């Protein structure tokens, strides 16, 4: 058996190594500009859970950095899994879920204040794994260790073993004897799962299969099972983590939002107007805002970043997933596209799939328990949404009217309010922010006649509306 130099242990890390007011006129629409996806976070783990009744499909994305010979994962599961219950998913499916549900930046452009008003209807690798203490290999029998190999099989590029254990020291010893070099502290964190009667899904890479596959990185692993327990084990991922870790969980339900029952969930700050210059700094804005919100919540809450059904989005940062893509994500209650029953196509609607996106930044001190969920019938829509409102510019018309004068006088106050909001959300220096704000003079300075001659006003207009 190939010697593994390290074990990336735990579900979540193993697979990788406020009052905010918005004017009513903005509602839920606008022009989509950018999204805050998981690429903003180093080694952010992603997990998708599709669940209806007691049936669950868990998808674990592998963002492992390192030699595949060193990769292994140990996941507590509620029941013994057979080969047919394990699948290797397409690498793109987690990206699709991320793209669809990511917090987003939108733009609006103020109308001409002097124009007649028109109404219309329309709307989760660990830090470097610490070397394990050198343990003399005794080749103690599995029965003596209290470990039972319940199942053993290969799926795609992975070799899978399902284990049960009577005590954590025996399980730790078994893993070491079988060339899993586990981190210090594993026995302590394995014990609660053994007490609960849980089994252990252990996976590592089959090098021959991986090399023949031609894939450049490890594909997500999926497991399907039935259990009344609706939970996600995260404690194993804290064994020797250096600092906090990010986890994004996509929860797919046929009925409505999925909530945490043992930790408080709060909505990420949303529907706020921020200065237009943030368009070029959205990644920095969102990471700073999340850091600030996380600290203000004492580092012990989960943040709701998105809640919507697959019937649409407003605005869309990516198209809703198709029936076939949803099935790739484990949504078993959706029929495949073109499926027939009783000599006719089986109908389905996107609104039978509701996605909840939770973002958890966790550490041992503030998240001592695994995540426990419950499905609800709450179908309230929510998204992390941040608004840029461009002021009207006289290149498009004139503000030479009473309403236009009022509009111009109100802009400095509006810009200051946007600056104050940005400073409060991110902790950025208010004076640095103010230096980047536009002034009324910048916006309403008459355009020199030669700009039209050289065609530069047209270029400006194109940049303004792009």
Image (cartoon, rainbow, N blue to C red):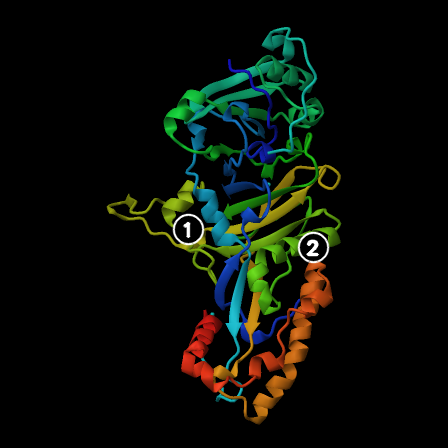
Image depth: mark 1 or mark 2 in front: 2
Q: Is residue 19 visible?
A: no
Q: Is residue 463 above or below residue 365?
A: below
In the rendered structure, the answer to whether residue 460 lies left or right of residue 299 reads left
**Percent position of residue 400, x then y:** 54, 92
Q: Is residue 465 visible?
A: yes
**Residue placed under numbered mark 2 in the picture:** 293
Which quadrant of the view contains residue 275?
bottom right
Residue sitting at the far left: 343
Q: Label 1 crowding class (10 Å Cα cut-off): few <14, some 14-19, many 20+?
A: many
**Residue placed under numbered mark 1 in the picture:** 321
Q: Is residue 198 above or below residue 233?
A: above
Q: Is residue 391 above or below residue 2?
A: below
**Percent position of residue 14, x then y:** 58, 31
User: SS of the residue at dot 2?
Assistant: helix
| Nearer to us in this view, 433 or 150 | 433
């Amino acid at each position: 058996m190939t010697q593994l130099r390290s074990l990336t242990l735990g579900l979540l890390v193993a697979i990788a190594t406020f009052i905010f007011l918005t004017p009513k006129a903005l509602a839920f629409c606008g022009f989509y500009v950018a999204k805050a996806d998981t690429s903003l976070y180093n080694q952010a783990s992603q997990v998708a859970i599709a669940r209806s009744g007691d049936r669950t499909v868990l998808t674990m994305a592998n963002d492992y950095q390192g030699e595949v010979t060193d990769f292994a994962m140990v996941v507590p599961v509620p029941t013994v899994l057979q080969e047919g219950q394990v699948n290797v998913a397409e690498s793109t499916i987690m990206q699709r879920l991320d793209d669809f549900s990511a917090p987003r930046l939108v733009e609006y452009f103020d109308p001409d204040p002097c124009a007649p008003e028109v109404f219309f209807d329309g709307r989760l690798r660990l830090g470097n794994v610490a070397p394990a203490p050198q343990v003399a290999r005794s080749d103690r029998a599995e029965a003596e260790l209290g470990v039972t190999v319940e199942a053993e099989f290969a799926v795609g590029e992975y070799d899978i073993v399902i284990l049960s254990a009577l005590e954590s020291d025996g399980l730790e010893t078994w893993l070491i004897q079988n060339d899993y070099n586990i981190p210090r502290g594993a026995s302590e964190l394995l014990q609660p799962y053994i007490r609960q009667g849980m089994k252990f899904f252990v996976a590592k890479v089959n090098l021959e299969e991986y090399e023949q596959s031609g894939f450049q990185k490890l594909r997500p692993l999926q497991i399907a099972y039935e259990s009344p327990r609706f939970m996600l084990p995260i404690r194993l991922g804290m064994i020797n983590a250096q600092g906090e870790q990010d986890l994004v969980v996509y929860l797919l339900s046929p009925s409505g939002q999925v909530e945490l029952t043992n930790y408080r969930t709060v909505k990420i700050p949303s529907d706020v107007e921020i200065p237009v210059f943030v368009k070029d700094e959205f990644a920095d804005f969102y990471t700073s805002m999340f850091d600030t919100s996380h600290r203000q919540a004492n580092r012990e809450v989960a943040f709701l970043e998105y809640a919507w059904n697959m019937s649409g989005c407003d605005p869309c940062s990516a198209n809703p997933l198709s029936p076939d893509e949803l099935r790739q994500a484990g949504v078993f209650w959706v029929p495949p596209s073109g499926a027939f029953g009783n000599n006719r196509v089986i109908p389905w609607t996107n609104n039978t799939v509701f996605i909840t996106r939770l973002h958890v930044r966790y550490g041992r001190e503030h998240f001592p328990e695994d995540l426990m969920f419950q499905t609800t019938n709450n179908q309230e829509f929510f998204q992390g949404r941040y608004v840029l409102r461009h002021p009207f510019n006289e290149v498009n018309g004139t503000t030479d009217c009473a309403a236009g004068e009022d509009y111009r006088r109100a802009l400095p106050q509006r810009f200051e309010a946007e600056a104050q909001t940005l400073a409060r959300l991110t902790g950025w220096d208010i004076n640095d922010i103010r230096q980047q704000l536009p002034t009324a003079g910048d916006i309403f300075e008459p355009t020199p006649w030669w700009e039209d001659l050289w065609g530069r006003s047209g270029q400006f207009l194109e940049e303004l509306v792009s």
